[in-house]
Amino acid sequence: MSLAADWTTALLAELPYAQDLRRKVHAEPRTGGYEQPTAALVAAAIGQPDAPAVAEGRIIRIGPADGPAIAVRAELDALPIVERTGVPWASANGAMHACGHDVHLAALTALARSARTLDLPVAMLALLQPREESFPLGAKDFVESAELARHDVRAVIGAHVQPRIPVGEVAATPGPVNASFDDVAITVSGRGGHAAYPQDARDPIVAAAAIVLALQQVVSRRTDPLAPTVLTIGAIHAGQASNVIPETASLLASLRTYSEAERVRLLDLIGTIAAHTALAYGCTAVTEASLGEPVLDNDPALTEAVWAQLSPQGLTLSAPLRSCGSDDFSFYSALFPALMMFVGVRTAGSFEQQPSLHSALFLPGDDAVERVARAMLAGFLGACSLVID
């Protein structure tokens, strides 16, 4: 039998164990920076409790002790969301695996445990990565770690559940598939005073409101309409009383784009617009950007190699999927040939009729563990065909 057939058989035998693990992980979620118990649980489940630690995560090598390796990533962290699914194994600690990371971890566990029973031609690295959802981003820690650097990584594979795609389909799209993501904080300073004497003050709230409106033109009038870009003002904070003009107002925004050059240009433009608009109201504005993920760019050759491996795993290639969502998997794609696949979990009806990612009701069935594991296997086999070609 072939490696693909042998591995698939071994993988299916591991699914009951992996699905049970998924429920354990889901019931005890850990938010970013506190994932050590989850990492220890999964490492022990894979069979290597003493795996090298990187930050709160682990890196586990399976197969040949030296030579090239293909990495497969799963995320450890949950979100600060109060779960409302009502299942017996729901979380009760104020956090929730509302983005499918419990499914990804269970799928990688099944893949890794089954890999241990085989004679792999290329080593597999199981990346149990922390802090995908929060700063400082865990993938950045991993790509900068000495532990990952000591392996000859030839490709990195990721698979993420996606309710926009029907069950049985997988999006494996070459080129950019997720946008860069940056946080932007704008602090507007004026002169506080009595609400009855506005002429003696310089109102930062009015200036902040004008900045919000002015920034709406960044996408509609200062950006190529064919270049995906999203600028969102997500929070405004100012004042504590109705009869007081405060000293300051603050805005929190996020910027997403598909171009590194646009990313730099637009961050500079946001600062310029904020400063000049505030000046028109007698105030000042200081803009600070916290750089997040770069653009997630799927390697075309790797992507095409994986296409041929999907059908034998019972998976169908879906229509291309690109979005302005972001994922720190992009740090891997910036350094290695990488592929992020999106695995369908939409069971019926339209996308709008089902809970979305990051919803307190989002809960793929246990059967999603098998499909994500099969997608990961297809990714590994496709990468392997390029490494040993």
Image (tube, helix red, strand yellow):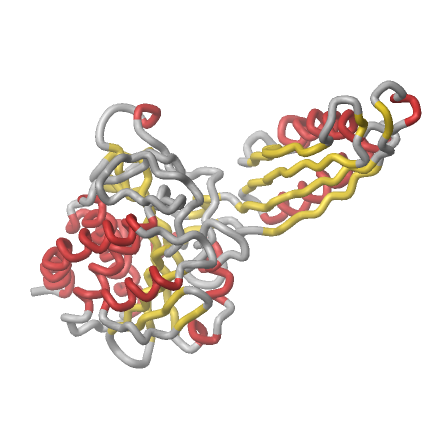
Quarter of the rendering containing residue 94: top left
Extreme residue toward the bottom, this view:
66
Q: Residue furthest right?
A: 200
* In the foreground, 118 or 312: 118
Above or below — where is 224 with respect to 101?
A: above
| Image quarter of the N terminus | bottom left
Q: Where is residue 268? Give x, y as percent.
A: 72, 44
Residue 128 is situated, as x and y percent measured from the top left of the image, at: 36, 62
**Residue visible at 18% across and 53% down?**
20
User: For this rendering, which residue is in front, 42 or 66?
Assistant: 42
User: Does 115 sit left or right of 125 as displayed?
Assistant: left
Q: Residue at x 26, y 58 (%)?
A: 108
Residue at the farthest left position:
1
238 displayed left or right of 163? right
Please say if 114 is above or below 231: below
Is 120 placed above or below 231 here?
Answer: below
- Residue at image coords 58%, 30%: 225
State the residue at coordinates (25%, 53%). 24
